[in-house]
Amino acid sequence: MPKWGMAADLDKCTGCGACVTACHAENNISTVGADQAARGRAKHWIRVERYWEGEFPDVRLKFRPVMCQHCDNAPCEPVCPTYASHHTDDGLNAQVYNRCIGTRYCANACPYNVRFFDFFNPSWEKPLHLQLNPDVSLREVGVMEKCTFCVQRIKATTIAAKAEGRELKDGEVNTACAQACPARALVFGDLDDPESEVSRLSRSSRGSKLLEDVGTKPKVTYLSRGN
Amino acid sequence: MPHSRINNDLLRPLFQTSWRFYLLVGIFGSIVLAALIAWLSQAYFGFGVTGIAWPIYWGFYVTNFVFWIGISHAGTLISAILRLVDAGWRRPVTRCAEVITVFALMIGALFPIIHLGRPWLAFWLFPYPSERLIWPNFRSPLVWDFFAINTYLTGSVLFLVLPMIPDFAVVRDKATGLRKKIYGILALGWRGTPKQWHRLESAMSIMAVAIVPVAVSVHTIVSFDFSMAPVPMWQTTIFGPYFVAGAIFSGIAGLLIAMALLRRFLHLQEYLLPIHFQNLGKLLLVMALLWGYFVFNERLVTYYGNEPSEMAVFWRTQRESFAPLYWTMIIGNFVLPVVLMGIKYFRTITGCVIASIGVIVGMWLERFLIIVPSLGHKYLPYSFGTYRPQPVEIIIAIATFAAMTLLYVLFAKFVPIISIWELKTGPSERTGLPHHLGHVGPVVTDRPRP
């Protein structure tokens, strides 16, 4: 059984935002318009956090792409009263939209604030409604949604490999964000395979986890050589 | 006081209806109706009509939930404790208190549904055998809430209704026509035989003992909604007792306000005496000190722990954007009640009401200040946020108070708000003597002689 994880190389990230756009396109994430976005209703399953370091004029700009960390010890899971937020066998932190009743407790418990609530029914300006991904379900008003590590791609590739009676190769499954990253800062793969690129990067001495001291055991490793 | 006079005074609101009653029902009924429309519009247009936004996903609704569940500790707990220690002065107070419990629980228990994204699926919280073999997640504090609140509601309804039976019988005997029939059914065939009195008293003794742990557990579990999540200033072991103390505190305040209003509008000056307000005022003082002690503990330990994410929230409430609300809370919850209730000169009915209003405002703010600043200041500075309540939430928050008043007015119309039989069996309240001077013997002997 694979264990899906990701590595994000902060030394490579340019903050271009291609991952955010790719994620929106792949996962049918509706945009909410400028007014609602200003009120905090924007839904970005992956976001590029921008931090300035140092005092002007000697400043450095740092980017950090943050998506669901698919924690092994996820605080969002035990608090959900309906099991909408639960752990799958391959280590994904799954969100069952149809089971969600919208208590929003999971989002409160999440230390990374990577869960997004649907405040209205989704809508797309024409002709964007024609570009929806048929493999991803739409979320109605009142449910919580978040990064799935592109579970539709994982499933499709796994099923195809099984039909051909072979093992998955490293790099065969890729998330939309990692695929779109021009700097190859994001790497997705199987953490159980010690030879995979993501495993290799996760063991790097440059690696660290986000908010490690909260004890969530995230499956995303951030690589940075520090200052 | 002669028994016929007690009957007359306490049954008057049931048999005489003035235009004031219809006016009150009209005013408070329309506020409740406005809130219903507000909520339906939220369900129709989408949850976005509220002020909730990333990352503050709980706001006014959960504040109201915790606040009203807190108020519900007025009644059953206080009246159960007073029954258990056999405080004679409790007699005119118990029913006013128990009614608050039932109505406050009914209002509070609405909020987990009001605040749902998809309220039409609220029944998924129920542990019913579904055809898909899916049960609720028993690890979730929200499911514990479901059980705790339902247990408490059932218990406190029983606790309220049991001692109403003899009074229903009194009304039945005085009434005519349809009213006689209805109260006859409610009186459950009460004839006042020694056997019936004995059963009633046994049942009340059992309920009084049983309801105390239930009441304590309810607000502890409500506090678990917060302390079980890794959120700065939420994950603390003090929340259980802190919430229970705060709940009883706000409950007493609610009871004092209700009693003062009843005394004035139902002309119960000879039943709800200054001594009742003074005694409950002393209880309010104790709870104010206890509340202050808990806040001091929580704040000082956080300050010395000096954990960065917690300190961010700490300073936000202590002296940054939430400071005006925080210090209003401290004044309302601590300074005002301690000064007014601590000095005998101010421990009058008016003093009690002023202190209680301070506590009600303060305790509502306390819950708000636990929820919102923490959620808006959670670890990653990039995702800090603010919350601005919208008209829907404000209308619904105001309407909870209107709903409480409305239910109370209606209740006082149909049920004697002071337990007639308990008053008749008790010591003379007119002397105003403390109960240990005015009352002898245990509860069991408190039986009207046939």
Image: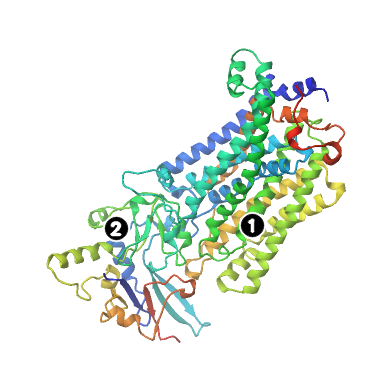
Give percent across and percent down for residue A175.
27, 69
Name the secondary structure under disc 2.
loop
* Label 1: chain letter: B
Q: From the viewer's perspective, is residue B250 above or below residue B268?
A: below
Q: Amino acid at mark 2?
A: Asn
**In the image as oriented, which residue stretches furthest toward the left?**
A164
Q: Is residue B2 above or below residue A164?
A: above
Nearest the viewer among A126 and B426 is: B426
Q: Identify the image quadrant of residue B122.
A: top left
| Front position in the image: B58 or A79 | A79
Q: Residue B398 or B408: which is nearer the viewer? A: B408
Check disc 2 and report the residue beneath it. Answer: A28
In the picture, measured across the screen, residue A108 lies left or right of residue B3, that is left
Pointer 1 with pointer 2, Cβ within 8 A: no
Work out whether residue A26 or residue B424 is closer to the camera in this orientation and state it.
B424
> Compared with residue B412, is residue A19 higher up or lower down, i.e. above or below?
below
Total residue callouts: 2
Please provide percent x and percent y for residue B173. 67, 16
Residue B245: image x %, image y %?
67, 53
Q: Name the image quarter holding residue A153.
A: bottom left
Mark 1 vs mark 2: in front: 1
Residue identified by numbered label 1: B241
Relative placement, left or right, of B61 versus A5 is right
Q: How much space separates mark 1 and mark 2, taking CA atoms?
A: 46 Å
Q: Is residue A168 visible?
A: yes
Disc 2 residue crowd, few under 14, some 14–19, many 20+, Cα 10 Å: many
